[in-house]
Image: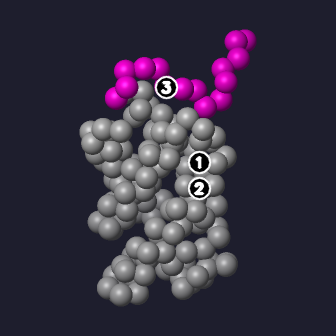
């Protein structure tokens, strides 16, 4: 894996996740931009493995994103008191930093992230993106 691939995946995560937050919440925080880039870089590395299925990718991605969200949340919200987010009112939350509903959202968000990873790989390897769902002629 080339540094250029990792940098491009970081930038895609940085901008795409920022856009998701702005569309859904109306604003974002600079730490979320960096976190989105970091997460996409990890997802790119995970999805570069040939044995990675869509379900494995989503499950592992959701688990990793939730763990990263907890770490960033403890730093941003508890230590620094920046109040970037608060899941205290969400069901099954832990310290108001992570919760089951958002872990499920991360699972679903890993589907388009996987598509982006496949296209990044195809762009840098000069080959056609491997389809996630087999294409059946009509």
41 or 76, which is in the foreground? 41
Q: Is residue 102 left or right of residue 13?
A: right
Q: Are marks 3 and 1 in contact (CB under 8 Å)?
A: no
**41 in relation to 135, above or below:** below
Of pointers 3 and 1, the one earlier in the residue sequence: 1
Q: Main secondary structure of the magenta part?
A: loop
Q: Mark 3 and mark 1: span between their CA atoms?
A: 16 Å
Instruction: Find residue 38 and report its horizontal and vertical position in percent.
Output: 37, 57
Give the residues drawn in magenta, as a range.
124-138
5 or 33, which is in the foreground? 5
| Residue wearing tag 3 | 129
Label 2 Cα crowd, 10 Å radius (few <14 / some 14-19 / many 20+): some
Q: Are marks 1 and 2 in contact (CB under 8 Å)?
A: yes
Which residue occupies 55% across, 35% down?
50
**61 in relation to 86, above or below:** above
Q: Mark 1 and mark 2: span between their CA atoms?
A: 5 Å
Figure quadrant of the C terminus: top right
Q: Mark 2 and mark 3: span between their CA atoms?
A: 21 Å
| Residue wearing tag 2 | 60
Q: Does the segment drawn in magenta span residue 86?
A: no
Label 1 Cα crowd, 10 Å radius (few <14 / some 14-19 / many 20+): many
**37 in relation to 44, above or below:** below
Figure quadrant of the N terminus: top left
Name the outermost residue toward the top. Answer: 138
Quarter of the image for residue 99 reads bottom right
| Residue wearing tag 1 | 57
Q: Nearer the viewer, mark 2 or mark 3?
A: 2
Of pointers 2 and 3, the one earlier in the residue sequence: 2
């Amino acid at each position: 894996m080339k540094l250029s691939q990792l940098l491009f995946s970081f930038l895609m995560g940085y901008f795409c996740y920022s856009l998701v937050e702005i569309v859904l919440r109306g604003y974002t925080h600079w730490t979320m931009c960096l976190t989105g880039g970091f997460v996409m870089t990890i997802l790119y590395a995970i999805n570069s493995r040939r044995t990675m299925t869509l379900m494995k990718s989503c499950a592992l991605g959701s688990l990793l994103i939730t763990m990263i969200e907890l770490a960033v949340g403890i730093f941003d919200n508890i230590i620094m008191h920046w109040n970037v987010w608060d899941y205290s009112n969400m069901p099954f939350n832990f310290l108001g930093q992570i919760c089951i509903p958002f872990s499920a959202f991360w699972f679903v968000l890993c589907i388009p992230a996987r598509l982006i990873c496949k296209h990044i790989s195809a762009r840098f390897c000069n080959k056609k993106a491997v389809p996630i769902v087999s294409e059946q002629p009509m």
